[in-house]
Image: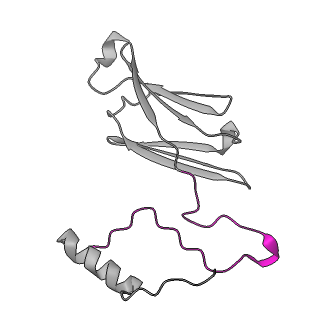
Amino acid sequence: MNETPHDEKSLEDMIRQIMELSGDGRPIVIGMKIIIGGCPNGVNPLARGDATEPDIEIHSVGDRVVLSTELPGISPEQIQVLFREDRVFIWARDPDRQYRASRKVPPAIKGSIGISFRHGVLEVSYLPSGVAAESH
């Protein structure tokens, strides 16, 4: 039952083939998690890459953009939101769980961002840079 089928290709060969197919030779990593053995004392510490990646929904409400994502079990002080040009990054972490998400979004006007967090749902609203700031 615990036998693993023998595969002729090694992991290194498969990665090398994927890199060759990408054309530019740069490494490509898409959501990889490797678990080797059990954790000592049954404790499973969160490791880098061991995070839930919730979806970020984008809505237009009037002239504002509203982003929402679910972060159950997190408190507001454990959440970080960062805008960088046309991307938003959201991180949240407590001793039992961590979340990370990013998404391409319309760029925000500096100073127009509002954040609310209720019942495990984070909402970030802002004026996109295409909206005239002087009318608000």
Tell me if 116 is positioned left or right of 83 in this view. Answer: right
The residue lying toward the viewer, choosing from 47 and 112, is 47
Tell me if 57 is positioned left or right of 37 in this view. Answer: left
Colouring scheme applied when the structure was drawn: one colour
The residue sitting at the left extreme is 23
Q: Residue at x 53, y 35 (%)?
A: 69
Residue 69 magenta = no
Q: Residue at x 58, y 84 (%)?
A: 3
**Whole-percent x and y of residue 64?**
39, 19
Magenta extent: 25-52
The residue sitting at the front extreme is 1
Residue 27 magenta = yes
Q: Residue at x 68, y 29 (%)?
A: 119
* Image quadrant where residue 77 sits: top right
Q: Is residue 125 above or below residue 83?
A: above
**Whole-percent x and y of residue 99?**
58, 50
The residue lying toward the viewer, choosing from 128 and 30, is 30
**Whole-percent x and y of residue 124?**
50, 29
Give the main secondary structure of the magenta stretch. Answer: loop
The residue lying toward the viewer, choosing from 86 and 31, is 31
Q: Is residue 30 above or below residue 135?
A: below
Q: Is residue 111 above or below residue 49?
A: above
Q: Is residue 73 above or below residue 122?
A: below
Q: Can residue 25 be seen in the rendering of this structure?
A: no
**Whole-percent x and y of residue 20?**
21, 77
The residue lying toward the viewer, choosing from 98 and 85, is 98
Q: Quadrant of the N terminus?
A: bottom right
Tell me if 93 is positioned left or right of 52 in this view. Answer: right
Q: Residue at x 47, y 25 (%)?
A: 125
Q: Can residue 2 be seen in the rendering of this structure?
A: yes
* Image quadrant where residue 65 sits: top left
